Amino acid sequence: MLLVHLRTLVSPATRRGSAASAITLAVIAIVLLRQAPAQAEINTLGVTDQLIAVQADKDSDSLIQARIQSIFSRIRSLENIEIVVADGIVELQGEVASDAAAEQAINIVSRVEGVIAVEDLAERTLDLKESITPIRDSVRETSKRWARALPLAVAALIIFLLVSFIGHLIANRSSVWNRLTRNPFLAQIISQAIRVAGILLGILLALNLLGATALMGTILGSAGVVGLAISFGVKDTIENYIASIMLSVRQPFRAEDHVVINDLEGIVVRLTSRSTIIMTLDGNHLRIPNGIVYSSPILNYTRNPQRRFDFVLGVDAEDDPADAMSVGIKVIQELDWVLDEPAPYAIIETVGDSNILIKFMGWIDQRDADFGKSRSLSIRAAKNALEEKGFTLPEPIYRLRFDNAPQSVDGYFPDRGVTTGQASSAASQKPVTRNTDETDTADVTPETHVSDRVRDERIETGEQDLLDDNRPIE
């Protein structure tokens, strides 16, 4: 209709007209566009889209009235509505309990053949009894259906309980799963999976017996959405759980191993389903999430009992570094706790402005010698040997300036009675005090206090450990 108007108005003369004609055309278009929603609103109020006959048929009105009356008489909430039909227009009169019933009546009438329009003149009584009656009838019908379905529901419940119980019995056969997986954590996971599968199978069979397959699909879909939301919320927990599985399978360390995990050093106590527990070297418990353990570098000192120690000593820049290296290596080789193979050696670390730094290295067996004690005593032995051979171990030199200090031209200090040259000479002639203790009598036995505490705790608590000594270590 709008296109017809526009084609009529937009004639060749209009196209050659002035700006006023164009404005008039725009105004008419806006008016027609505003009329379109109003027409659509009339249709939603009960006006049908069928073609209206040119001549009214009274017989048709009677048939329409009879058909609508027959339908309303079968609906309790609409039986009090009076129907008047004239020229295809239906008037609804009388009383109706609620707006919902009136809307239902209009929808029914609008679908009857021959109806042109529907005029709602019925009054809303808002009667409490009339409003409660449909709800009461619905509850009554639902109760009757549940009563008829009660034996079937009992049978479905019995099937669910029976299948779930069988799954529970199978899941409790832990000895079978331990023999199959040889891993207590994997055996526990398989047991839980079988138990959950038994419950899901019982629900599936019960719903199939009740004929609620659509409900089953809805439940499964909702479970998937809920599971996805929960997985995002407990992402860290799931990560730790998967890491626990991988660690229990790969076995990167054993209980009582001396390890460093992400710069955290200690003795391994146990591996649980969520974290790795270690005891630090100062005797404190440290719990590290397995997600961090699995993704971090792991340094295991126990795997290889031989361990190298190193230290740096500096000699004067005028000394021969090769002679200093030879003296230091020789004295280190003579120490009881230093291994002959691999042999100790030394390298020049760097050359400074006033000294040469030499790095000495040697190997020990951690089962017989403590690393810290061995390194400390080796430093003392090498230092004493270098000093005895006449090598100078440079010390930091600081230059001090005294702006108002009293002194003579020749460097004489009145309050000390000595010149600067004499002070330097006296300092150079000062005897060196040395420790006469023999290094071979030093105690380098390994420190086992922390390891003993870990062993005692594992025996006393008896908690389940995912670390298995019978499985190959990675």
Image (cartoon, rainbow, N blue to C red):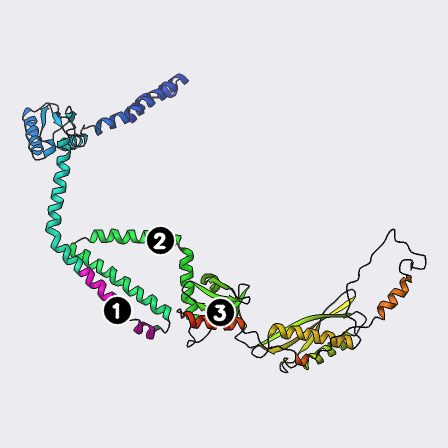
Please identify the quarter of the rendering in which residue 291 is found.
bottom left
Q: Dot 1, crowdedness within 10 Å: few (<14), some or many (≥20)?
A: some
| Tag 2 and tag 3, C-beta contact below 8 Å | no
Residue 7 seen in this snapshot: no
Q: Residue at x 7, y 35 (%)?
A: 74
Q: Residue at x 66, y 72 (%)?
A: 376
Q: Closer to the camera, 420 or 272?
A: 420
Q: How far separated are the C-alphas under marks 2 and 3? A: 35 Å
Check residue 162 for magenta coloring.
Answer: yes
Q: Which mark is residue 228?
A: 2
Q: Residue at x 45, y 70 (%)?
A: 457
Q: Dot 2, crowdedness within 10 Å: few (<14), some or many (≥20)?
A: few
Please give the range of residues in magenta.
159-180
Q: Position of residue 305 (x, y in %)?
A: 55, 77
* Residue denoted by label 1: 170
Q: Decide if residue 264 is on the left or right side of residue 290.
A: right
Secondary element type, mark 2: helix
Q: How far separated are the C-alphas under marks 1 and 2? A: 29 Å
Query: Of callouts 3 and 1, which one flags the residue occurring earlier in the amino acid sequence?
Result: 1
- At label 3, the amino acid type is Val
On the rendered image, what quadrant is the N terminus found in?
top left
- At label 2, the amino acid type is Leu
Q: Position of residue 41 (x, y in %)?
A: 24, 27
Q: Nearer the viewer, mark 2 or mark 3?
A: 3
**Considering only vertical position in the picture, is 95 above or below 238?**
above
Q: Which mark is residue 322?
A: none
- At label 1, the amino acid type is Ile
* Residue denoted by label 3: 268
Q: Dot 3, crowdedness within 10 Å: few (<14), some or many (≥20)?
A: many
Q: Main secondary structure of the magenta part?
A: helix
Query: Of callouts 1 and 2, which one flags the residue occurring earlier in the amino acid sequence?
Result: 1
Check residue 107 for magenta coloring.
Answer: no
